[in-house]
Image (tube, grey):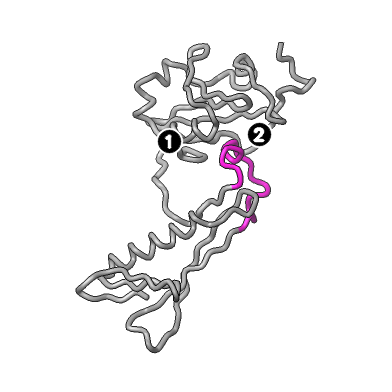
Amino acid sequence: MLTSFTASGIFFYPEMRSFFVLGSEELIVSVAQQFAWLGAVCRASTGQLAYCYTAFSEVNNPYSLGPMFNITYEVSSTGLENIESCWHSLVGNSVIATGFPITERDNGEVGLQIPLEIMAALAKAPHLTHFCGGYVLKSRSIVIVPVERKGNSIQWHLFQKQGRGRIRYHDLNILCPNRLLFHSFGQEDLTSTSCFLGWCPQIKTNLGKFSINVS
């Protein structure tokens, strides 16, 4: 229930699974937005990558002191079947809260905006290493490399070997021969740039196949 009064406050009624909000219109809108977002990001996984859609609907209650709204959620994988991006394998069976505002992307950045430290933790690659003149995040079966600079944004790309087999450092010469090197992305840029994980809309992994010469 949302009601505008001079006083302000938020009251929770667990038996009704309801919040009663008193305050200015700006406060009420802000609280409703935050409840909607929290509910969306806390949805349980369906066992596969999925979207969470959020909807508001007004409740007609003649005894209410102000307007009442229901916030409902629908978790669905519809629309993701034919979309492939390298970051999908990193987040697993997560639920994506869709329909909420994100930071403006002025340079055509694509993919998942994520702090470098979190990206490294999800990839189980705790150390950023130097290899052949550039930075590499690598675990046993995953390697993540910077591939393009767009102003203060860095596009990263993830490669994962089929069957979660071991990727060698020297496989990078085949996987990503044009990755960013230190002259374009140096040590000072690690803390001053934004990280976006995602590159190709479709990925074909050839590591370990007979058609590729990895010698």
Q: Residue furthest left?
A: 6
**How many numbered markers are drawn?**
2
Residue at coordinates 50% horizontally, 54% vertically from top-left? 97
Q: State which quarter of the image contains the N terminus.
A: bottom left
Q: Earlier in the sequence, mark 1 or mark 2?
A: 1
The magenta stretch spans residue 24: no
Asked if 77 appears above or below 141 in the picture, the reply is below
Instruction: Tell me the kind of residue under disc 2.
Output: Ile
Q: Mark 1 points at which residue?
A: 115
Q: Residues within 10 Å of mark 2 (few under 14, many from 20)?
A: few
- Across and down, in percent, residue 210 comes to 79, 20
**The one of 24 and 164 positioned closer to us in this rendering:** 164
SS majority, magenta: loop
**Which residues lie in the magenta part?**
76-93
Q: In this view, does 130 lie to the left or right of 211?
A: left
In the picture, the disc for residue 203 is: 2
Where does residue 32 sit, x and y in percent of width and height? Answer: 38, 65
